[in-house]
Image (tube, rainbow, N blue to C red):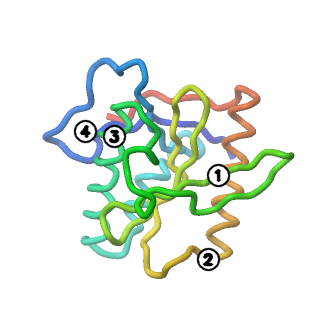
Amino acid sequence: MTLALRRLKIEHFCSNQKSPLVDPADAFKVYGIVENRTNDLVFEDLRSLSNEADKKSARTALIKLLKHAENGPPLEKCFDSKQCHPIHQFLHQNDNIKIWRLWLAGVIRICFIYLPSNRIVILNILPKRQDSITKSQKGNLENLALDILARDKQSLLSVLEEKS
């Protein structure tokens, strides 16, 4: 399976708002993962949410995430610790890997990792039905994070043209 990144912009989730034409120097760029060059996981996660309220909450949370990312500080400095904190941490080859969670719209968790050069990669969008994620969800997030981190470290993570 090939993995790549695709830059996410506000207009992907809200037709009447636009991302800036030029990124401020300290802005974070937010990416979704694309499998096999066609399967955008963020959009798959949105489609798989069980009801319209969850989908609306997810879009609202993504728009807020993107707006704050444009301003530059890491997201945990923009939101309080209940909204944004590590959802899972693990040790891999003496590195402490943190998977972050953003919880903005009540019923949705957006799970992401930071990459060097002010990049954020969204790993998963999960409905929040219980206080903590399952062992299976942790394993899936861990595997995806390790795959993205390894590909990035080896410069094997390509960025596809932006979704229109």
Amino acid type shown at disc 1: Lys
Q: Which of marks 1 and 4 is in front?
A: 1
Q: Which of marks 1 and 3 is nearer the N terminus?
A: 3
Name the residue that disc number 4 marks.
11
Residue 38 to residue 51: above or below: above
Label 1 crowd (10 A; few <14 / some 14-19 / many >=20) = some
The image shows residue 124 at horizontal and vertical percentages of 51, 58
Q: In this view, does 146 lie to the left or right of 33?
A: right
Residue 21 to residue 127: above or below: above
Q: Marks 3 and 4, how far apart in space?
A: 15 Å
Q: Is residue 56 left or right of residue 107?
A: left
Name the residue that disc number 1 marks.
98
Q: Are marks 1 and 3 in contact (CB under 8 Å)?
A: no
Label 3 crowd (10 A; few <14 / some 14-19 / many >=20) = some
Q: Which of marks 3 and 4 is in front?
A: 3
Query: Which residue corresponds to the image point at 48% horizontal and 81% vertical from the top-left?
Result: 130
Amino acid type shown at disc 2: Thr
Q: Which of marks 3 and 2 is nearer the N terminus?
A: 3
Dot label at residue 134: 2
Q: In this view, does 107 lie to the left or right of 7?
A: left
